[in-house]
Image: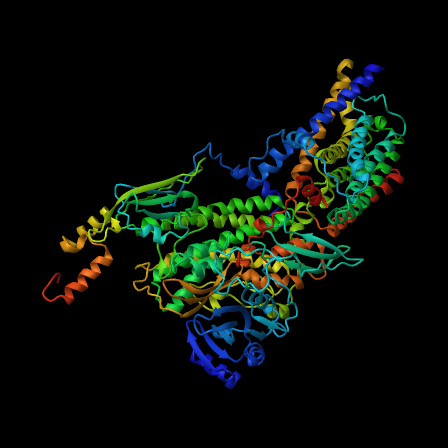
Amino acid sequence: MIGQYLSLVIMVLIITVLIPVLDGIERKFIRARIQSRVGPPILQTYYDLIKLFRKELLVPSTASKLFIIAPMLSFSTSVAALFIIPYTLSNPLSFEGDLILFIYLLIFSSITALLGGLSSGNPFAEVSSSRELSLLMASELLLGLSIAVIALKHSSLSLSKISSTPVITPSTVLAYITLLYYAFIKSARTPYDIAEAEPEIASGYLIEYSGPLLAFAILGNLVRRYLTTSFFVIVSLGPLISLITSVIPTPIKGLTNYVLILILSMLTYLVLGTASVIHGRYRVIHALDSVKKYTCIPIIALTLAIVGL
Amino acid sequence: MVDVVKLLYDVLGVRILRHEVIKGGVIIDVKPEDLGDVVRGITEGLGGIYTVVVGVDARGIDGKYHNIYVFSLDNLKTYILIRVRLSPEDPKVESITPIVKGANWGEREVKDLLGINVLGHPDPRTLILPDDWPSNTYPLRKEFNYYVRPKPSNLGSSYVPKRSEEVVALPYGPYHPLLHEPEYFELHIKGETVVDVEYRGFHVHRGIEKLGESRLTYNQIPFVAERICGICGFVHSVCYCQAVENAAGIEVPERALYIRSLVLEVERIHSHLLWLGVACHVLGFDTGFMHAWRIREPVMYLAELLTGSRKTYGINLVGGVRRDVNKDSIEKVVKILKNVKEEYDYFVRSLTSVKEVIKRLEGSGILPKSEAISYGVLGPVARGSGLKRDVRIDHPYAAYKDVSFKVPIYSGCDNMSRLMIRVEEVYESISIIDQLIDKLPSGPIMSEDVEVPEFKEGFSGVEAPRGEDVHYVITGRFSKVYRWKVRAPSYNNIPALKVMLHECPLSDAPLTIASIDPCFSCTDRLVVVDVVSGKKFKVDFRTLARRGRL
Amino acid sequence: MSRLSWIKKALEVGVVTRKYPFEHVEIPEGSRGLPEFDSSKCIGCSACANVCTPDAIRVIDDLNEGVRRVEYFVGRCIFCGRCAEVCPVSAIKITKEFELAYKDEVKFIIELKLVKCSNCGKSFTTTRHLNYVLGKVGEGIPELITLCPDCRRKLTINSFITPGGGIV
């Protein structure tokens, strides 16, 4: 029992340590190389975060207490969501409704990030947060619809069951594709980095953050970015992975599962990164339009799921 | 030329006290009371477009102040300079801004720097001088010594921010990631739409005009003129040399004219590539930014090959150029340009695949044609609104009469038109360079006779990448210049932002500002005010830090 | 053209950043860098100082010690190369050197002996400049060579006034 919990903590710790390195790899080998430049060292994100933790914390006088709490909440809930993912096919924390818990933590993490910006009192942050909220509402609809399809087809709300039973039908395939698109939107990279648009609104909701709080805010963003990608992998490729690991001998079955999930998540993360580099930033209206147009896919998926396909 | 003079007398009659024909233009003297009628006659009667207002402390010449209003008659290839002479004790003149919107800044500048009172100006706030400049101290007057740094007076600003319930004022500047130079745009937004914009610039004054008048000689000024701008410096250097050459009647040898045009076009290419990169960056497409500047790098190398320096070329002197191009360089030029053209072609075609960028450019930042004429906008901004204005054709200079090229005109009036114009101009520039190299005549590169007589006026315009750049020169004594006026194209373009940003969605605001390709270094080139060193508060660090956080 | 054209181009071009200063970067010929002064050739005529726009070259006469110092301060230099153009004895050469960071304020100084007027004792030019001019015009008029311009003028006028005397 204790062993299971311990191994879960270790697995989550490894992921949390790897996330900044993953970001570094994206910055150097994807972003920079496509732009024909050398790029920062792979550990640069670490250097940035460590530097930020050493800097002075300045809180604007117009900010409320939420300003200070929000980034830390955002980071901690996103890490909490990491604990629920079934890496080894049997998570000690899993229960029948943990899919809902996962979604809840994910959305809570996104909203607290924005609320922090809104409570700073800076007009740039207000503008950016309002943009991000409209995008949030549009994109969460995609999430909700695809989750509905998946839960329906699996007849279960448990992440462990969903990620270990393969259900390949037209509706679930469409739902998986929607989840990939959702991961792309939520990753707050171009073209959807509307909230953080540096040239336009001077970093938007992050503008008043400095020092350790900024580090937490950035960490929260990074973990969320990984989370959404990993969620897609777990739900869509998880059954496939568990099929592969079923032929592996028992002692390292869980470990292989974990490693495969990790590798596939990282690959998907980098693919999304590549897609982002060749896009320009959407104007808010265009972004909402594109999400709106795409929503027909999960709606079709849901209809198909209801009729049994 | 004779046609123009006759035309002027036909339209203005006895209002012209006297006229003088100079190279490229006609100066007419009128009485201050007749100014409004004369301006109306030129703009409405002859279709002249506002160019610049120059104030001169001419008390050393004829004991008066001069105010010169310059208009361009594009179809007749002439500049019309209207001069009024004002009394030295109380120089004042009626504002022409109600008639010509573009004269707004010019008149405020003359008031700030020379103390010429402009009556009836709709917006008489200080334009250039900082808020703590002592009153009745006019930097461009001859008694104000170049080395003087006046003590600051009490801070009082004529700029009062407008605030209201629904409108949020979003400050862009003086420091902002979008802006490359310090300037201050206050965007008043309602929701996501910009309803008004307040601009305050001139943070980067360097006293270049005063510098030119005080401690520099004729042939030293081109080097300073080149440093007016970080991108289009050579344009200023050529324009100044042309103005002095016009004033003194110096004939520049043909080869020198060709070399000047060649380098001007190289500058145009690198400036437009820079702008394309910046536009991509503003739109969030950093990959385009990086690649545009990657393509630009060989052009900078090319400039260094031709002139000896990547940016401040330093090849212009009054009367010609001081450095020749040899056959080796020419071969390398042709090779490098071929590569640049290929890469550029690929870049432009790839850019059309990035649909987000294209969609954001279309339909944003509209400047209707009537407003464009009224504000006297220049360059791609004017041509994007359907105005056929290009100094290379309207007032030909250097070797442009010997080459054939197209000037792209678009009537879309939006950001997309301005981008398309700049994209096409690069192709045209490459073609012009090829033609120039082909036809390069042999001969000297510096005129034999470079004597500059005293107190002669010269005026010249050059098509910078951003529009028409004009210099006005009155030659002086002891190899010095008596008055040197620089008007960069962004000076006329920035006031038009008020129209372009009206009812514009916020996300398009930075793009619109960037689309006029503002070169604030060029625009802010007047008096140096060392406010920073004057304002030495004795506060401890804590107080300063706390004040900075508010 | 599709979006992937950007990736294709990046793969084709690779990384364009040069590892300067750990990698040699080619500077084209004729690129203007630091001027090099040859103190053996300089005659102290001040043509370079006259033409220098930012006053990076200054010529200061130290009358106590009887020397003329030509001072070049690289901090103000704009590397226009005008000094090399106008130097009558080609004592200035423009090199391609552009890596010029120094810890201290470095000035390059040429010291030249001044000639004293044999009449009034005022210093008016350097010995080298005088010899240079003599080299061009021949021996010159012996009475006038060692006089400063004021004394020379006075002597010449006097020679006109005094009948049959002095220089022609």
Q: Is residue A81 above or below residue A178?
A: above
Going 62% across and 29% down the picture, which residue do you hit? A42
Camera sees residue A78: yes
Q: Position of residue A203 (x, y in %)?
A: 69, 44
Q: Hey, which quadrant is residue A276 in on the image?
A: top right
Q: Is residue B241 above or below residue C105?
A: below
Left or right, B279 with respect to B59, comes to: right
How many discs mark residues in the rendered view? 0
In the displayed structure image, the side of residue C110 where residue A120 appears, left or right: right
The colouring scheme, among rainbow, by chain, secondary structure or one colour, is: rainbow
The front one of A91 and B112 is B112
Location of the C terminus of chain C (image quadrant)? bottom left
Q: Nearer the viewer, residue C2 or B359?
A: B359
Q: Position of residue B140 (x, y in %)?
A: 51, 63
Q: Residue at position x 40%, y 56% from top? A: B220
Q: Is residue A172 visible?
A: no
Q: Position of residue A118 (x, y in %)?
A: 79, 44
Front residue of A292/A223: it is: A223
In percent of width and height, residue C103 lies at 45, 35
Vertically, is B229 above or below A191? below
Left or right: where B110 falls relative to A128:
left
Q: What residue do we see at 69% from left, 53% from top? A: B171
